[in-house]
Amino acid sequence: MKVEPDYKSIGDLFRDANVFRVPKYQRGYAWKDSQLEDFKDDLIFIHENGAYEHFFGSLVCAQAESIGGHEKINQLVDGQQRLTTFVILICCLIKKYEALNQGENEYKEYIDEKIKELKERYLFYKKSVNKKTEYIRRLELSRRDDEFFNNKIKCIPVEASRDSHKRLDAAFGFLTSFIDDLTSHKSMSDSLDELDALEKTINEKCNIIHMVTDKVADAYKLFQVINDRGEQLNHTDLLRAKTLGITDDKDDELIFNQVENIWDKLDEDYGSSLEKLLGYYYSSHTGDKVKGASFYDQCMDRIFSVDKKTSPQIVFDKMRDIKKSLEKASLISQGEWPYTNSVLSSWQRSRLKFLIVYLKHTHCIPLLLAATNLKEKQFYEIVRVLEIFFFRYKNVCGNKIDLATTRYYKSCREISDGKFTVQGFKTSLRELVHKHAFDEVFKSRIDELDYSKSKVSLRYLLLGLEDSWLWYKSGMKEGVKGREGMFDYSLIFDFSSATVEHIYPQCPDVKDVNLEPLLNKLGNLTILGPKHNEELGNLPYSEKAKIYVSDTKLKINKEFENYPVWNKESLLERREELMNAACCIFNF
């Protein structure tokens, strides 16, 4: 790849024979108030510090000279947002000069020359062809924005029909106000001095790196690895441009318009989350890991190609599937159940939120997305296995999730090939538990949990024990199948409102030197609703135990009738029972 980086000012960039063309399928203008504020703040800082220069980032272009060797046509792959904003600023500057030049004034000739100079440098490139003068636009935007942008430059009234149009409109208004503020309450002479200083700032002190390749493909590769204000550039821009390019057919725009509408809808619905959701889709579809800077190539090779070939119809079919799948992926990523008209209980559906939101296990989302192609009952079984596995293997035992993720991807492929079974999935994860989270390890890690550092883990552990306590105390009849049959599906504990209660209180009237070291350990903790937790506070154990046993609906708390006094021996005995129960309950 041949790359020619050139560090130069904005003025020098436009003084050359450069014209810029945003690829017609690239995303629209995206800067919002926060980016415009940053842009303005940078300009003000330079404007008020005479010798200061500022770097505004890079422009990545594929460059070719036009026929006849006049202007240099730059396909603007990256940097369109900042370059467009600079051109808008120049337009606002020109309009301010025009407003000041109304009627006769002593500076009329000077202002006319300023306007002419700015237009010919920043808005139009002037060239002579066959003894005629032609004016070539310096900047053309993407298909969705260019007509609107050109009308704004020419001051032709136009309605903003897209979000990107509204952002362009807002940028014109924002920068107009910025320039108005610079000249507010100033004489004509002082106003012209301010505008001249701003122009000098733009021309000489706003710097960029102009990175030029001679191939569009090479420019896109640069695009994939360059950061914009610290954020990795979005591969969805590349995918949008490529897929729309494939479907562009002047004789039949139906597929093109449908694909463009799907991209617009995805962008509107998911915004900055779109690339992450597309990553989930890719992995669920291929059973392969997203590979950073290669994601665009992965998608083109594995999603938008069939037998290494692509076509408008293939792209359209895939985009429809992506739209449908991303609706499910978005629900799953929020812990929302992806099946409509569910036949399962609220308790069963709630397990997805426990897995994704409370335990924060997102590595499994591609698998869950693939599993939406299975029957709802199978999907639920997968969720339950994942919930129990992740809590035991990663949350408590602290193992890295990589080995499990590899198995998730394999399961995605098996679902696609029609070879997946829940039993086979359980077996593959049990292998990891038997090696890295077997009972002795699990118990020792539970014993290390401390409420001061592991509130979420302990709350989840206690809720899980409560859910299956009746099954455990009945001798675990019929194994895991029997456990599912003994759940009280009508009782759903709100994870966020359920509270962990200290049996020996955190602030006792008289401290017990034997219990203080065990204050935040599992044996001294139980689960309560917020009402009871507040009521019990520092009550003596004898009074607490009565409420635990009689006033709460929690089965795990009925066991306190077996502990007439609360001392170190009681605590350690209860701890041992809870840990033994956990080994049985958090199993599959």
Image (tube, helix red, strand yellow):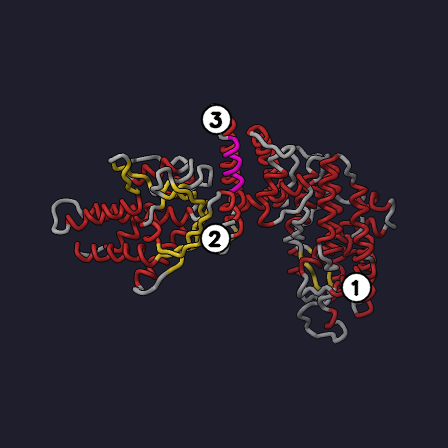
Instruction: Say if residue 551 shows up in the picture.
Output: no
Q: Residues within 10 Å of mark 3 (few under 14, many from 20)?
A: few
| Disc 1 target residue | 444
* Residue farthest to the bottom, as pictured: 513
- Mark 1: amino acid: Ser
Q: Which residues are magenta?
A: 238-247
State which quadrant residue 66 falls in. Answer: top left
Report x, y in % for residue 455: 67, 60
- The mark nearer the N terminus, 2 or 3, is 2
**Which mark's residue is nearer the viewer, 1 or 3?**
3
- Does residue 467 appear to the left or right of 477 in the view shown? left
- Rendered view: 587 above or below 423: below
- Rendered view: 446 above or below 145: below
Report x, y in % for residue 187: 17, 56
Q: Is residue 241 magenta?
A: yes
| Disc 3 target residue | 253
Q: For numbered disc 3, what is the local secondary structure?
A: loop
- Does residue 326 appear to the left or right of 264 in the view shown? right
Question: Disc 1 to disc 3, how far (Cα)?
Answer: 65 Å
Question: Disc 2 to disc 3, how far (Cα)?
Answer: 33 Å
Report x, y in % for residue 267: 50, 40
| Disc 2 target residue | 228
